[in-house]
Amino acid sequence: MKSFKQIYNEAENKIAGIAAAPGIVISKVYLFTKEKIKINDGEITDIEEAVSNLYEAIEKSKKELNKIFSIAKEKMEETRAAIFEAQAMILDDPILIENIVKRIRSEKRQPEYIVHDEISKYQDLMRMSHESYMNERAQDIEDIKNRIIRNLQKRRWKSKITNDLIVVSDSLTPADTILLSRCNVKGFVTDHGGLTSHAAIISRSLNIPAVVGTHNATSTIKDGDNIIVDGFHGYILINPNDEQLKFFKKKLEHLIELRKGLEEFKDKPALTNDGHEIQLMANVDVTGEVDIVISSGAKGIGLYRTEQIIEELGEFPGEQEQTTIYSKLSSRIYPDNIIIRAFDIGGDKVKFLNFEEPNPFLGMRGIRVLLENKLIFKTQIRAVLKASKDKNVQFMLPMVSTIGEIRKSKEIIDECKKELKSDKIPFDKQMKVGIMVEVPSAAVMAREFAHEVDFLSIGTNDLIQYLMAVDRGNDFVSDLYQEFSPAVVRTISHIVIEAKKEGKPVSLCGEMAGDTLAIPLLIGLGINSLSLSPATIPYAKRIISKFSFAKARELSNDCLNSSTETEIQHKIEHFFKIHDITRTRNII
Ligand code: PEP
Ligand code: MG
């Protein structure tokens, strides 16, 4: 059978975008085109009537948003649904409303023109920041603006959608996404929007596969076309041929097959068939994912990527805000542990103050930024400590490359502890502090680094990037990004052996932990704690139940003696075959 890569390489009917919500769907298209709103900018004679129309339209818009908010609450977690509440709050902004009313009175123009002009000014300011987050929020405001104008024009939201279709649209506001989902929408495709767009976040919460940011979906796909949306890889195939249909129908059957019998693993520990327990924890990128973590049967959160909060908010959260977020998570996950990672800013992630540098991956990133900006670091540490009072919070430092960085960080942590103590604020005095091992220098010096901290967590995403000198996001060199390279396998083994000499635990939280093909090898290498995406946890438990620790050890020894990636891959594939494990990589 061909691979996804081959299918997509050969396809001439494909559109690429961003894989925003996982899953595969094959269905007919509903092309969702929003009527272009025409703005009447004419003069008015009756000012009082215009002002009263404005207030009426605002009230109507509020009612609509409240209705959407209650539908959203039924369908998803309340924290996610709260964006509609936030939108409704804009309609209560007295300064905005006052400005609009003042202008209607002084300019004597149609309220819809003034509303459009006044709100567009806010949007322009937001778009000027060039941050993707702010652009997304400007888009949310577009929804409110159009809602008020539509209500001023006394028009209704129209959609002729029938059930079970894939919605293809220029962009989707959060409200569109929620309202359309009531028609049992099978998938979403948009021209615009990124991973953090609310439409993408909502699709993930609703479990509807989505590909966003395609640029040309609406100009290429026609209403009624049959399409395949692949929310795992970020592709759409338009009017697929027989071979493509056969391939994806097989994948869908495979997905259904894989899901069967998974339930029985949910509440059980992850045990090899000779009783060796592996701790499977969850990676959390978005605060609202905690429900998914709990229902996945994870044993705690092994990596909470806090920089995502900055991405979601568009700014650094304050101490109080962070304390609330971390406390909520730690109490939800209690008595299991949560490992909160300090902001990993820089590289290809959130930029710090739009700081430009020639080589961001090798520049100001992770712990380097935090040590240079002590105030930001201290704010986060104080919040993490405050959330640690039930003793289930651990703190982890990203991108560490020298012992000096660990020592300086520990000094700052101690400083924060002293402050909280003198203010009589409770916290866990023994809160564990660990580091990510994701830079070759940390791997080579694993023993000495382990001596300084309570635990190590291997971040293979970056470790492979820095070890192989391959940009993790660069397609041109992606063939060299080899997680089964003997260099990677031996480095992981070295880290485990060295940390053991110090009696310190090692876990692994890069994407490699979620590559089901890698699991027996990693266990054989002595990793007994993996942190992976919650969706993969039940699959991982089932795989682990099929082999013994002794056999995994044999496999890893065999791989440690190999000299090419291909050799290692073949050995793993053979291992899967003789243990009757369905060959799966990243689930499908
Ligand atoms: C890693 O590098 O493996 C890791 C888990 O961190 P991130 O992907 O956030 O850089
Ligand atoms: Mg990393």
Image: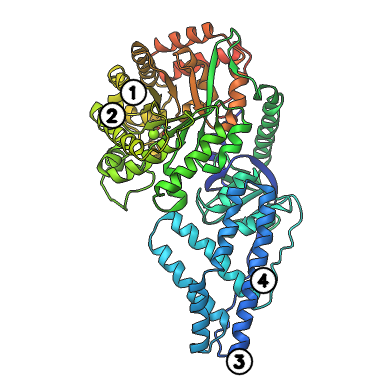
The residue lying toward the viewer, choosing from 171 and 428, is 428
| Circle 1 Cα neighbour tier, 10 Å, few/some/many (<14 / 14–19 / ≥20) | some
Residue in the image at 57% along x and 37% along y: 290
Q: Is 548 placed left or right of 499 in the picture?
A: right
Marks 4 and 3 in Cβ contact (< 8 Å): no
Q: CA distance from mark 3 to mark 2?
A: 70 Å
SS assignment at label 1: loop
Q: Amino acid at mark 1?
A: Val
| Residue 520 percent across, percent down from the top left | 52, 16
**On the rendered image, what quadrant is the C terminus found in?**
top right
Q: Amino acid at mark 3?
A: Asp
**Vertically, is 534 above or below 103?**
above
| Nearer-N-terminus badge (1/3) | 3
| Circle 4 Cα neighbour tier, 10 Å, few/some/many (<14 / 14–19 / ≥20) | some
| Circle 2 Cα neighbour tier, 10 Å, few/some/many (<14 / 14–19 / ≥20) | many
| Residue 251 percent across, percent down from the top left | 65, 33
Marks 4 and 2 in Cβ contact (< 8 Å): no
- The residue under label 4 is 60
Q: Amino acid at mark 2?
A: Ile
- The residue under label 1 is 453
Q: CA distance from mark 4 to mark 3?
A: 21 Å
